[in-house]
Image: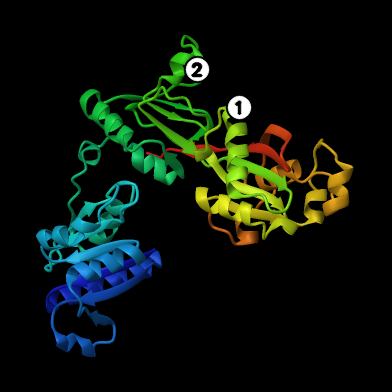
């Protein structure tokens, strides 16, 4: 994480140094210090004097930093960030501390962006009080957006977060249906709808307040999507992003699988420069993985076989083998790719080799789980 801290007085600049020391020592984040205090601070190499307007500086930081800390009045911070706010799911966390160092206040992206957690950490390190104002935290209740972020779940519609939080605050209780494994202690205000609820039909269980599933259901107040689905593909040279997209969405629709749950596009390494694959992966934010012929040959399973494909690329099946390879054998640390992680063994091949217009597709889903904080 890259954090930018800006101060407006010499006393604030000294506090920013204390914060930086605490953050870098304990969290190993990258911290840059800025000030609007006075030109004399230009002589101090560890703090950069901001010559541009505060608005221009803030715009730049929203583009390159992952958190902002203002040491000064809340009004200064609010006016500075206001033109650049977009969504609670994309805005970076913004904190405010007054220069005496008594209080640290997260004013933006406290939940999903991690501002509350960062404020609590900094406050503890400098002997301050973290002023948390989000309603579920104040009432000690389950925060569904924090749960989603910690479990790398994509939020379907952000308005659902407010609906779930409102029900929690009014009724102190919500229901969850999770189609993966569950670890940790479920909060007392959350009822898990699972196999133990024998008196409820599957349709009733799907009408939970929060549904965690790779399939589009459309019956919950809020749906969360695990990034658990892998696409294995092969294609003739020159297939466009639009052709690939139409084919993939058609087949996912047949399976009732949401594109929101797709995390990986996998193929053979001779297709690593295929522009259609590159464009499709970029459009949907997918990890694009390629495997060598020997890697794919080593994948165990009962796969469709094509002599034509073997003649072209040296192996009898690309799409199924690539899907399974990505779902079961991929290791984040081996390939040094931080955007997905399929360390756990186990998968289900949801769609075997399907061909259309010079493209082949197989769909696999790796086993997944969610974790509640231990209490």
Closer to us: 278 or 296: 278
Q: Dot 2: within a 10 Å radius of its alpha carbon, few (fewer than 14), some, or many (20 or more) residues?
A: few
Q: What is the residue that sits farthest to the bottom in this orientation?
A: 43
Q: Quadrant of the N terminus?
A: bottom left
Instruction: Name the secondary structure under disc 1.
Output: helix
Q: Which mark is residue 304?
A: none
Q: Is residue 209 left or right of residue 259?
A: left
In which quarter of the view is residue 162 placed? top left
Q: Position of residue 356 (x, y in %)?
A: 71, 37
Q: Quadrant of residue 348?
A: top right
Which residue position is annotated with label 2? 196
Q: Nearer the viewer, residue 152 or 120?
A: 152
Residue located beneath label 1 in the image = 254
| Horizontal side, residue 319 vs residue 79: left or right | right
- Please give the name of the residue rendered at 63% of the width and 38% of the height, measured from the top-left corner: 247
Give the mark, 2 or 1, whose residue is nearer the N terminus: 2
């Amino acid at each position: 994480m890259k954090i930018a801290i800006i101060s407006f007085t010499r006393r604030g600049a000294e506090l920013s140094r204390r914060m930086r020391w605490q953050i870098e020592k304990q969290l190993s984040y990258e911290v840059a210090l800025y000030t609007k205090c006075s030109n004399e601070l230009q002589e101090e190499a560890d703090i950069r004097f901001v010559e541009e307007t505060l608005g221009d500086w803030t715009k730049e930081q929203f583009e390159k930093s992952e958190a902002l800390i203002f040491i000064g009045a809340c009004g200064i911070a609010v006016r500075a960030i206001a033109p650049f706010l977009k969504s609670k799911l994309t805005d970076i966390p913004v904190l405010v501390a007054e220069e005496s160092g008594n209080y640290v206040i997260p004013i933006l992206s406290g939940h999903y962006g991690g501002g509350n957690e960062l404020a609590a950490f900094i406050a503890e390190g400098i002997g301050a009080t973290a002023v948390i104002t989000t309603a579920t935290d104040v009432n000690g209740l389950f925060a569904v957006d924090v749960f989603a972020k910690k479990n790398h779940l994509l939020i379907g519609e952000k308005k659902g977060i407010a609906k779930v939080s409102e029900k929690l605050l009014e009724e102190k209780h919500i229901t969850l249906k999770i189609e993966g494994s569950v670890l940790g202690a479920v909060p007392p205000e959350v009822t898990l709808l699972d196999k133990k609820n024998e008196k409820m039909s599957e349709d009733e269980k799907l009408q939970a307040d929060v549904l965690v599933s790779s399939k589009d259901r459309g019956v919950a107040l809020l749906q969360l999507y695990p990034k658990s689905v892998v696409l294995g593909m092969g294609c003739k040279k020159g297939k466009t992003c639009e052709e690939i997209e139409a084919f993939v969405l058609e087949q996912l629709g047949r399976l009732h699988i949401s594109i929101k749950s797709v995390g990986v596009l996998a193929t053979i390494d001779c297709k690593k420069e295929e522009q259609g694959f590159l464009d499709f992966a970029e459009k949907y934010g997918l990890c694009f993985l390629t495997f060598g012929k020997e890697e794919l040959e080593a994948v165990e399973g009962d796969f469709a076989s094509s002599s034509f494909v073997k003649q072209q690329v040296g192996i009898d099946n690309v799409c199924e083998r690539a899907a399974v390879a990505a779902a079961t054998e991929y290791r984040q640390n081996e390939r040094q790719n931080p955007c997905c992680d399929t360390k756990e063994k186990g998968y289900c091949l949801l769609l075997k080799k399907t061909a259309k217009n010079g493209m082949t597709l197989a769909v696999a889903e790796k086993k997944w789980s969610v974790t509640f904080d231990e209490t």
